[in-house]
Image: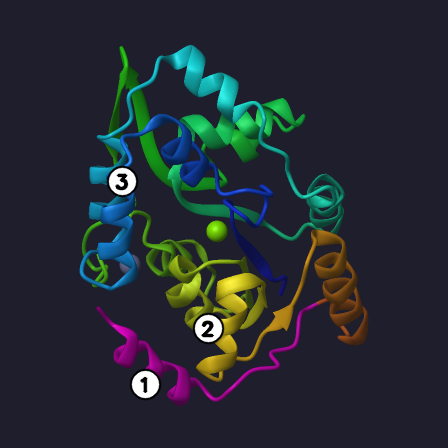
């Protein structure tokens, strides 16, 4: 029984939040007001991104030039190869946009299934002149939070019920997925959220630490499976209801 790894993209695999970068540089400043509504819990990330991306005014060339400046975690490539050698499946779950994520991954030397969609679950983007058109193939019921990409639901669909789920993330939009995972690696806002809500997690800064910790966990267990060091299920389920927006 091998663990299945799910990772957020923006700020986790990439060093900056690419969507925030696009909005900061290429959208009407009123995108920040929409962000406030999301921060206050008034809207979900799907509505938030739909309205924010409608404020983008840029050509494909401008968008690409900006996206091409985005660096990845320097250890992600090695981690990806390590997971491949270990035959641990790895999926990317993102509220961000397929066109952008694939371009960033391609620029940094990734090909194959990581960028062709089989391992990537994200929002979708089309460029129409100086406007962008968004769609959200992994939103909608049974999601109760109006997520742009419902990470919890994708995890539920992809996982083999027996496989331990490892989740890696950095932001508040990762909080529902963190509650559903067996092992959580967290930084920044997700780390604070997990600590405040008693969700067991391992802090990390780069993928090098995640590889080391997962390798140690795999070595400790007899069949290469990851043990489940976490809080009782009931407790996290209760939390999930409390944070529902
Ligand atoms: Mg993130
Ligand atoms: Zn959801």
Q: Name which quarter of the figure residue 40 lies in.
A: bottom left
Report how far apart the C-alphas of labels 3 and 1 lie in the structure.
Answer: 33 Å
State the mark number for residue 193. Answer: 2
Above or below for 133 versus 16: above
Tell me the mark number nearer the camera, choosing from 3 and 1: 3
Q: Position of residue 174 (x, y in %)?
A: 43, 60
Between 183 and 171, which is closer to the camera in this rendering?
171
Looking at the rendering, the quadrant in which ligand 2 lies is bottom left
Residue 147 located left or right of residue 64? left
Report how far apart the C-alphas of labels 2 and 1 lie in the structure.
Answer: 15 Å
Q: What stretch is highlighted in magenta?
A: 225-245
Q: Name the residue under label 3.
A: 31
State the mark number for residue 238. Answer: 1
Question: Which comes before the other along the chain, label 2 or label 1?
Answer: 2
In the picture, which quadrant includes the C terminus?
A: bottom left
Residue 218 located left or right of residue 40? right
């Amino acid at each position: 029984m091998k663990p299945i790894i799910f990772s957020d993209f923006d700020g986790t695999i990439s060093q900056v939040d690419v969507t925030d970068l696009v909005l900061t540089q290429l959208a009407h400043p009123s995108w920040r007001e929409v962000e406030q509504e999301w921060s206050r819990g008034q809207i979900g990330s799907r509505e938030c991104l739909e309205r924010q991306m409608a404020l983008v005014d840029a050509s494909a060339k401008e968008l690409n030039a900006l996206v091409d400046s985005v660096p990845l975690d320097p250890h992600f490539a090695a981690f990806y190869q390590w997971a491949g050698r270990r035959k641990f499946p790895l999926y990317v779950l993102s509220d961000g946009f397929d066109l952008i994520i694939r371009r960033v991954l391609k620029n940094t030397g990734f090909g194959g299934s990581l960028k062709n969609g089989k391992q990537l679950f994200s929002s979708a983007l089309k460029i129409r002149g100086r406007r962008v058109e968004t769609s959200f193939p992994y939103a909608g019921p049974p999601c109760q939070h109006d997520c742009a990409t419902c990470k919890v639901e994708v995890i539920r669909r992809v996982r083999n019920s027996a496989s331990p789920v490892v989740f890696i993330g950095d932001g508040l939009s990762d909080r529902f997925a963190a509650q559903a995972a067996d092992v959580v690696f967290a930084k920044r806002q997700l780390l604070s959220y997990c600590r405040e809500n008693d969700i067991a997690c391992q802090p990390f800064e780069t993928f090098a630490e995640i590889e080391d910790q997962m390798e140690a966990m795999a070595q400790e267990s007899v069949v290469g499976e990851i043990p489940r060091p976490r809080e009782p299920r009931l407790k996290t389920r209760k939390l999930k209801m409390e944070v529902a927006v």
